[in-house]
Amino acid sequence: MGLTKTEKFTEDQNTIALIAKAFAHPARVAILQHLFKINSCICGDLVEEIGLAQPTISQHLKELKNIGLIKGTIEGTSVCYCIDKDKWAEMKSIISQFLDQDLNDGNTCC
Amino acid sequence: MGLTKTEKFTEDQNTIALIAKAFAHPARVAILQHLFKINSCICGDLVEEIGLAQPTISQHLKELKNIGLIKGTIEGTSVCYCIDKDKWAEMKSIISQFLDQDLNDGNTCC
DNA sequence: ATTCTATATTGCAATATTACGATGAATGAA
DNA sequence: TTCATTCATCGTAATATTGCAATATAGAAT
C-alpha cells in the first residue's frame, strides 16, 4: 500500500520516523554536511557540489525545509540556506534519546 | 525514478542514509523500542504489541535484520529476536558523529 | 523593456515502500 | 499421522519517493 498507518503508533515513534526519513537519502545527508562544513549559508553551489539536477536538489531542500532542519532566506536573486541550529538541537535530542536506550545491560538471551 | 543515485555520494553518506532508512518507519521504531524495553528476546508478541498484520511485521523484522540491527534465532516453534548490541553501538557511533557536526559555532549568517 | 541568472514548480516515468491475504515450511502436541 | 502454532514468503494493490526535462517566477543587469 505504501501508506504508513500513523495512527497505530505513538507520537514519539512517528516523530523519530519523520526525522529519520529526512536523513534517509544520501543527497540530503550531503546537503546537511555541506551546510555544516562551510558553516554558513549556501547560495547555489549545491547543484555543483552534489551531482544531481537542479530540480532534484530543490526538491530535497524543500523536504529539509518542511521538517524545519534548514531555513532559507532570499538574498537578492539567490536563496540562502542554512541549518536551523535550534531545530537541529531539538532533533538531536530526540534521536539521541532513542539511540541511548541500550544503557541498561540486563538479561540478554541471544 | 525512485532510484537513488548511490554512486554520486560518499560511502559515509550512503551508510548514514541506510541506517536512517531503518528508522524511517514508526513500526520499526516501535519494534526496536519494544526489544529494548523487555531487554530480552521476543518470541511472537510483536504482532499484538504493534497493530499490524503478521506478514507486515515479518517484513519490517527482515529489514532490521538485513542491516544487522537485530538478530533472530529459532527457538522451537517460534523465533527469538533481539538487538545486536555490537551493531547497535557501531550504528550509534556513526549517527552520533553525523548529529554532532554542529559543535563549532562559527559564522552563521542566517 | 529585455535578457540573464538563480531557484521553484509542474508533470511525468521509473522504482521503492507499505500493507495484507493466501500460502508454505517447520516444529511441537495430540 | 494429523492438527495447531509460529513465522516466512509470494503475489498484489495502493501509495510514496526519486529524478529530470520543461517551464515558471523573480530579481539584477544591461
Image (spheres, coloured by chain):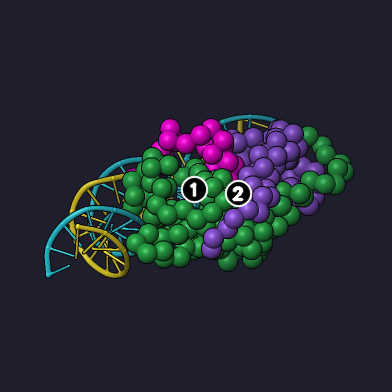
Chain colours: A purple, B green, C yellow, D cyan
- List x then y, in percent, for residue B24: 53, 47
Of B76 and A28, nearer the camera is B76
Tell me, yes or no, if residue B85 can be seen here.
Answer: yes
Rendered residue at 67%/59% (across/down): B89
Magenta residues, dominant SS class: helix
Disc 2 versus disc 1: distance between alpha carbons? Answer: 20 Å
| Mark 2 or 1: the one toward you | 1
Instruction: Tell me the tag on residue B31.
Output: 1
Instruction: Tell me the tag on residue A23.
Output: 2
Q: Is residue A51 magenta?
A: no
Q: How many residues crowd mark 1 within 10 Å: few (<14), some (14–19), many (20+)?
A: many
- List x then y, in percent, for residue A48: 67, 56
Q: Which residues are magenta?
A: A1-20
Quadrant containing the N terminus of chain A in the rendered view? top left
Rendered residue at 51%/34% (across/down): A10
The answer to which quarter of the image holds residue A70 is top right
